[in-house]
Image: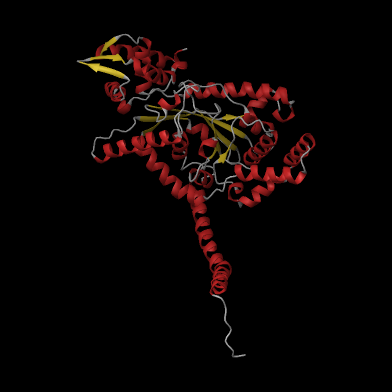
Amino acid sequence: MTNTVAIPLWLVIIASIFIVWAILDTILMPSVRWFFRRRVNRIITQINTRLQIKLPKFELLKRDILIDRLLYHPDVLCAVKEYCRETDTPNRVAMAQVEHYAKEIIPSFNAYMYFRVGSWLSRVVIRFLYRVRIGFSDDKGFEKIKKDSSVVFIMNHRSNTDYILLAYLALNKVQLSFAVGEWARIWPVQQLVSSLGGYFVRRGSGNKLYRRVLACYVQMATQAGVVQAVYPEGGLTRDGKLQDPKLGLLDYMLRAFDPDSERDLVFIPVAVNYDRVLEDRTLLVKKDEVKKTAWQVFKTTSNFIRRHLWLKISGQWFRFGYAVVNFGTPISMREYVEKHHLHFNELTRELRFEKVKLLAKDLIAEIGKQVPVTSVSLLSTVFLAEPDMVFTELKLKAKVFQLLEQLKQKEITVHIPHGDLDYMISYGLKMLKTRHIILYDRGEYRTNHDNLNVLSYYANSIVHHFN
């Protein structure tokens, strides 16, 4: 009993690792999880007291539970059955594929990350890049929304900073869940987006099984009252104009909407306009042109950041102008279907798509009405109308006054910084001159034809106001 037993060193190391792991798993980890869960619950309680729309229980469920709910959703099981019959695929293989889709789509929302890290990050980034202003907000309409309604913000898509901007502005009112494209599925952006409640969408995917899984998740979230933000254009505008709507996400929400249920579905039109879009020149590159390699993109981005950081440090940095956002009047689907005498969930697929298309066009039109006019977009319109004209500042002001009169008659929101029209014009000219979009020589301004496409991009953001 007292004899010495020789044990190999490698076995001692392995046994020690297992012992340490057992101690961590049974004693320390539960305490750590309890500590953080308690802290998160305290944050949720504090946040719910100030939010106009409280966090739905759906957002607070464990991700594994949501995945199981989606896996065994009746519509998903029917889709799996059809898929197996059509492709002669074993059921277990199809279910494994569905599980992969579910894990890809369903976010791992973390309240602490959203309301502490995410809020701080959005505030720092947006204030660093832009002077943010709300041009118009129908607060009375927002207050009329019933607390148990499913709210969806629908917004024009001009920049990838739209996500950060809208989250920043809605921070004290609601928690937003975004549909994010595949561009964000890179480390560590994917993990950050998922923890902030964003769900990933494979845009343009023709996979019927994937589309059914995505549709079921969107319907589950909508019916549970998750506040969502959707870009009906489907992607970034490449020419500055409002694009025709894509029907995917809207159709998913509406096909499951029951106007006789307790929960209404409310769309809030949101429109944004920037004095400068960070990706403008990249968006203007035609699809058939040779795109930059990953290294070239990284190099260009690094040089851009380095240059602006140096300007910031040296006190020469100039922010990218104003980012102006308008919140339109909420549109109740319960009132809409009553007015048009229809039930989306009772229509055939073809007829439902036809009705959803009409609604989508109305929503895009509402967004278009709300697009604010900024100094850069207004001056770009003036220069683009007469690209060969040489303008003095007096001529420019006369043209601007003419456009403002037209906009006033249509009750379009025009952002005039500090209420000073002279400042607005000089500020816009400075933005355009700095980027060499217009040229200045001895008191005269003219269009730089080498950057005519950029000028057109900004003028196109408000071109529908003059049609």
Q: Residue 379 placed where, x, y %?
A: 34, 18
Q: Is residue 135 shown to the viewer in this render?
A: no
Q: Residue visible at 39% across and 40% down?
A: 125
Q: Residue 422 placed where, x, y %?
A: 27, 21
| Residue with the most extreme bottom position | 2
Q: Judge by depth and name the residue closer to the eye, 331 or 237.
A: 237
Q: Residue 454 placed where, x, y %?
A: 39, 20
Q: Is residue 402 shown to the viewer in this render?
A: yes
- Left or right: 134 as drawn, with respect to 89: left
Q: Residue 180 placed where, x, y %?
A: 54, 37
Q: Residue visible at 63% across and 28% down?
A: 335
Q: Residue visible at 32% across and 12% down?
A: 399
- Left or right: 414 as drawn, with respect to 232: left
| Residue with the most extreme left position | 442
| On screen, residue 109 above or below 155 | below
- Left or right: 95 as drawn, with respect to 167: right
Q: Judge by depth and name the residue closer to the eye, 58 or 441.
A: 441
Q: Residue visible at 42% across and 14% down?
A: 409
